[in-house]
Amino acid sequence: MKTLNNKILFATILVLSLLLSFFTNDFATIENLYDVVNNYTMLMILACGLFIVLISGGIDISFPAITIISQYLMISLISKYDFGFLGVFIIASAVGILLGFVNAIIINKLNVPSIIITISTLNIFYGALFYLTKGVWLYDYPEWFQEEIIFIKAVTADDFVYGLSFQTVIAIFAVVLTGIIVNKLSIGRKIYALGGNQDATSRIGFNILKLHLFAYGYMGFMAGLAGVVQAYTVQSVAPNSLLGYELTVLAAVVLGGASLSGGKGTLTGTIMGVALLAIIQNGLNLMNVSSYWQTIITGIIIIVSISATALGQRKGA
């Protein structure tokens, strides 16, 4: 089932790429592909975190607020103190992990469906942020955080500079780390077991609280990294910039075959889900489709994807 889903995803990505290359002039250009990769690194990072939460049997809706809070505090501090790039990641990650732990503890202690808790904490986090910041945007960046960082540079005939960007390096780190966790470490197998059957996992002797802390803390860690990437890319911080973004990330992970009931999904599928969503949205932009229609199409994609996954699971059963 996993292999079939990944094959279908790969074939869909290939067909869409060929169609967009044929029907648009800009899709297959280096400039466009470079921009797509950079613009969707944040989605990839957040998808890695949500993937871990989903296979644990939970769901986190609060991560957009965690991302914004992490980057808001990080930018507020580095604009006053010279922490350097290491400090940037420490601050954002620490804030993200702490807020992720808040979700994990509430979910574990109250034994309430995680979607209800994280919708609640989403509103709490956003409400506290807007109250404390009064909705003020941040633009005051230190010079060292404004410089464009590109590794392994190359230049096109039109003098367009491209290469391995700072954002891409962070996204690759997120993917590699997530792959090590789910494929090489025992904690990954425990997370899959938790999502498959929490009662059985508890009877085996696994500490459910620790697993919840790891899953939601990891989501918080990825939200912190995503906060750094977005702040660096946009060069501003708006408290309301990620409202509704949870839908996009959820669409990408579910497209990749992760089950909302937990215990099922692959990182490869998640990566291809992000790629497919990026290609669809980029293609719609190139064809000048209204942003309102793009939102509708994203919602339809989620419904179709969930329906196809559920149908496949029923047939498998």
Image (spheres, rainbow, N blue to C red):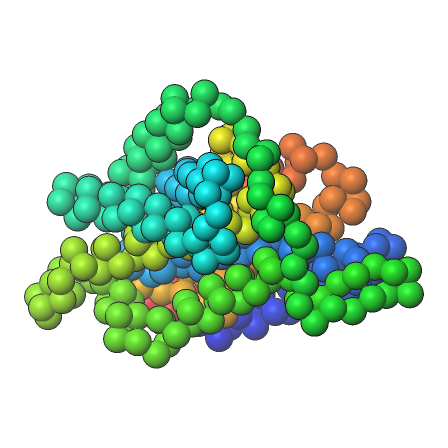
Q: Is residue 63 visible?
A: yes
Q: Nearer the viewer, residue 121 or 91?
A: 91
Quarter occupied by residue 30: bottom right
Task: Give the image location of residue 155, x and y in percent.
Answer: 83, 66
Task: Give the image location of residue 198, x and y in percent.
Answer: 18, 59
Q: How many marks?
A: 0
Viewport quadrant of the N terminus: bottom left
Q: Nearer the viewer, residue 41 or 59?
A: 41
Viewport quadrant of the C terminus: bottom left
Task: Give the image location of residue 23, x and y in percent.
Answer: 84, 55
Identify the residue shown where x is 13% and y is 45%.
Answer: 109
Q: Is residue 288 above or below residue 185?
A: above
Q: Is residue 236 above or below residue 134?
A: below
Task: Give the image location of residue 154, x and y in percent.
Answer: 78, 69
Answer left or right for 98 relative to 10: left
Quarter occupied by residue 142: top right
Answer left or right for 12 relative to 96: right
Q: Is residue 108 above or below residue 161?
A: above
Identify the residue shown where x is 70% and y is 50%.
Answer: 282
Identify the residue shown where x is 60% and y is 51%.
Answer: 144
Answer left or right for 186 relative to 51: left
Answer left or right for 24 relative to 12: right
Name of the residue lying farthest toward the bottom: 184
Identify the residue shown where x is 49% and y is 67%.
Answer: 173
Q: Is residue 196 visible?
A: no
Name of the residue lying farthest toward the right: 157
Q: Nearer the viewer, residue 309 or 28?
A: 28
